[in-house]
Image: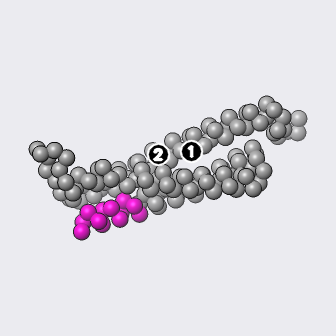
Amino acid sequence: MMFYTLLGVSITVSAVVAACVTGLFHKSVHTIYEIISNDAMARACARYVVFASMVVGIASGVRTSTLARYLRKEHVTDRVLDLTPQAWVLEVWGAVDAVLGNLAWVYLWVFHLALVAYIVLRAFGRIRNESGG
């Protein structure tokens, strides 16, 4: 029963952290996409980034290989780990850490790709200088 509770807590914590980070960056992502495309495309791209962020965040926070150590031995000499309070703290913190780390990479890629798109579109005259020139 404790294992299922830990799994549920890992999913919940990962979803909450991913939702907070996604909410924090959503307006910035939408604004960037509005600059490089029309409004409908900007909305669609921003919605996809929200979806991808939630998927990456939850998937990275629920570390099944780590959780499996509480169910079975990896090798004959190993033992099944106990779910102590210390293990809970480490597992929950590991989930938060994994979500934040992977979402940092997601948003780094999103912003880099948007910057490349901006530069290319600006070079071909599709985007004018903000000062009107």
Q: Is residue 131 visible?
A: yes
Contact, mark 2 vs mark 1 (Cβ under 8 Å) = no
Q: Mark 2 packing: few (<14 Cα in 10 Å), some, or many (20+)?
A: some
Q: Is residue 111 above or below residue 96?
A: above
- Residues drawn in magenta: 1-12
Question: Is residue 31 on the magenta stretch?
Answer: no
> Where residue 114 appears, x then y in whole percent?
67, 40
Q: CA distance from mark 2 to mark 1?
A: 9 Å
The total of numbered circles placed on residues is 2
> Where residue 91 appears, x then y in whole percent?
31, 54
Residue tagged 1: 107
Please identify the dominant SS of the magenta region. Answer: helix
Q: Is residue 21 visible?
A: no
SS category of the residue bearing label 1: helix
Residue 11, disc = none
> Where residue 63 appears, x then y in whole percent?
35, 52
Residue at 48% across / 51% down in the picture?
56
For the N terminus, which image quadrant? bottom left
Residue at 33% across / 61% down in the picture?
7
Q: Is residue 63 above or below residue 128?
A: below
Residue at 46% across / 60% down in the picture?
15
For residue 5, what is the image quadrant?
A: bottom left
- Disc 2 residue type (three-letter): Asn
Residue tagged 2: 102
In this rendering, position of residue 46 left or right of residue 38: left
Q: Residue furthest right?
A: 133
Q: Residue furthest left?
A: 77
> Where residue 88 appears, x then y in whole percent?
27, 58
For the C terminus, which image quadrant? top right
Q: Is residue 8 above or below residue 124?
A: below
